């Protein structure tokens, strides 16, 4: 009875009478795109190949004891394997449900309502999302097109860091959605880190596509406790659906991030991660094929007269040439994703299996020819 009275009061006042934070009132749920009717899935930068058999076997083993919470013995070997893979000590590694969760915790740790967060425009969508969730405003540094690359104006970035006094700077390198390497070099990054250190700013450097770029600044985490590197097993390791990512940072920063992590990560994900890191040969083959297919795809897009960009990732971005390209490809059961960078529109297509890539090229030819 009393319960019914309470619900009717809530109904009368409306749910929004709850003390929801002002900056969260307009926020809507992230809704994953539908895969229904799609034959060629090239919209989320996943690996087109499933994980190897060794990973599937490890998941089955984990399922057999899934009545139990994961113990320390289930987690620590994963941390050790990731550390060995990344060339750091295990105390430099924090594991999350996807790189996404490590990014979330970084924001939770340092970003207060009203703060500025400096990001390239555009970048991986979860950065502006977590800025918003934490009540911060985004100070964007626009990317500009230079030949076949997108570049970040590093001097402008340094000025904005000085002017805005942000709590966090996030840079995805390579950048999503352009595929470009946007950190000019170690000297420039060190200059940013020094500046950021003086102003007590956390720099999140996202290397989600490291396996495709071979560019890493992990070596700087020892000297710069304000640097957090993000990595993931969602791309080259074919584990997107199991949600395993990690951060690499100075042990003191790792300890602070760990203090915000949920107590348990799913056992199948932990077991899968360990097996995936051990099967290095599989990842090497996946990367090799994707890189060669990526270059094939770029060449074919160029032959269709499309402006494409050099990519250090598992996707290719290009100027669409016509309106509504994403929709027109969807009608042909192919999913890609379009983005806006300032006044430009670009389309991002994940590199798929050879057959997927051929189907994309053929569909693009048809769509472009029919206007
Ligand atoms: C730049 C970048 N960072 C992080 C991620 C997150 O990956 P996950 O949460 O699957 O580890 C992605 C995924 O697309 C990405 O593009």
Image (spheres, rainbow, N blue to C red):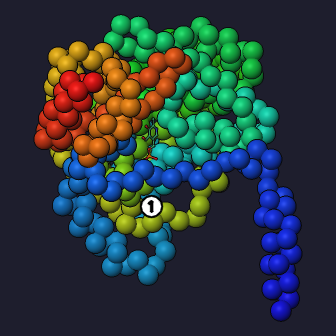
Q: In the picture provided, is 358 more to the left or to the right than 269?
A: left
- In the rendered view of the protein, which quadrant contains the N terminus? bottom right
Q: Quadrant of ligand 1?
A: top left
Query: Relative to the observer, which residue lies in front, 290 or 36?
Result: 36
Please report the residue visible at 81 percent of the width from the left and 65 percent of the height from the top.
14
- In the rendered view of the protein, which quadrant contains the C terminus? top left
Please report the residue visible at 23 percent of the width from the left and 15 percent of the height from the top.
305
Query: Relative to the observer, which residue lies in front, 230 or 194?
Result: 230
Please report the residue visible at 22 percent of the width from the left and 40 percent of the height from the top.
352
Q: Position of residue 155 (x, y in %)?
A: 59, 8
Look at mark 1 in the image and give the residue it sits on.
75
Q: In the picture provided, is 82 more to the left or to the right than 41?
A: right
Residue 154 visible within the image = yes
Query: Relative to the observer, which residue lies in front, 5 or 99?
Result: 5
Q: Position of residue 215 (x, y in %)?
A: 36, 25
Residue 295 visible within the image = no
Please report the residue visible at 41 percent of the width from the left and 77 percent of the height from the top.
66
Query: Relative to the observer, which residue lies in front, 177 or 7?
Result: 7
The correct choice, above or below, for 55 with respect to 200 in the image is: below
Q: Residues within 10 Å of mark 1 (few under 14, many from 20)?
A: some
User: Is the shortest distance between ligand 1 and the CB of mark 1 under 8 Å?
Assistant: no
Residue that protrudes farthest toward the front in the picture: 370
Q: Position of residue 121 (x, y in %)?
A: 55, 23
Q: Position of residue 337 (x, y in %)?
A: 39, 36
Q: In the picture provided, is 66 more to the left or to the right than 108?
A: left
Secondary structure of residue under mark 1 = helix
Q: Quadrant of residue 115?
A: top right
Q: Quadrant of residue 298?
A: top left
């Amino acid at each position: 009875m009393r319960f019914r009275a309470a619900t009717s009061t809530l109904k009368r006042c409306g749910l929004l009478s709850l003390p929801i934070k002002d900056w969260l009132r307009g926020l809507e749920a992230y809704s994953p795109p539908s895969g229904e009717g799609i034959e060629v899935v090239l919209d989320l930068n996943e690996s087109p190949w499933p994980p190897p058999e060794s990973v599937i076997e490890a998941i089955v083993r984990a399922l057999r004891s899934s009545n139990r919470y994961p113990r320390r013995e289930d987690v620590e070997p994963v941390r050790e394997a990731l550390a060995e893979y990344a060339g750091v000590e295990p105390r430099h590694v924090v594991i999350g449900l996807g790189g996404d969760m490590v990014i979330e915790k970084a924001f939770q740790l340092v970003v207060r309502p009203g703060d500025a967060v400096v990001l390239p425009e555009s970048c991986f969508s979860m950065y502006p999302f977590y800025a918003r969730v934490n009540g911060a405003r985004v100070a964007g540094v626009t990317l500009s097109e230079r030949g076949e690359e997108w570049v970040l104006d590093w001097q402008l970035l340094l000025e904005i860091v000085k002017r805005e006094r942000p709590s966090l700077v996030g840079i995805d390198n390579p950048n999503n959605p352009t595929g470009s390497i946007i950190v000019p070099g170690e000297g420039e990054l060190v200059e940013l880190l020094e500046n950021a250190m003086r102003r007590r700013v956390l720099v999140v450097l996202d290397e989600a596509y490291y396996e495709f770029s071979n560019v890493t600044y992990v070596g700087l985490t020892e000297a710069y406790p304000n640097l957090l590197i993000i990595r993931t097993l969602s791309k080259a390791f074919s584990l997107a659906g199991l949600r395993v990512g990690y951060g690499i940072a100075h042990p003191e920063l790792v300890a602070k991030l760990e203090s915000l992590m949920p107590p348990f990560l799913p056992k199948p994900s932990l077991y899968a991660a360990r097996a995936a890191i051990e099967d290095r040969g599989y990842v090497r083959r996946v990367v090799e094929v994707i890189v060669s297919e990526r270059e094939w795809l770029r060449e074919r897009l160029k032959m269709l007269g499309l402006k494409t960009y050099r990519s250090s990732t598992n996707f290719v971005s290009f100027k669409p040439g016509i309106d509504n390209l994403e929709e027109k490809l969807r009608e042909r059961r192919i999913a890609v994703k379009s983005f806006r960078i300032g006044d430009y529109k670009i389309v991002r297509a994940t590199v798929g299996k050879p057959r997927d890539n051929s189907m994309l090229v053929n569909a693009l030819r048809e769509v472009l020819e029919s206007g």
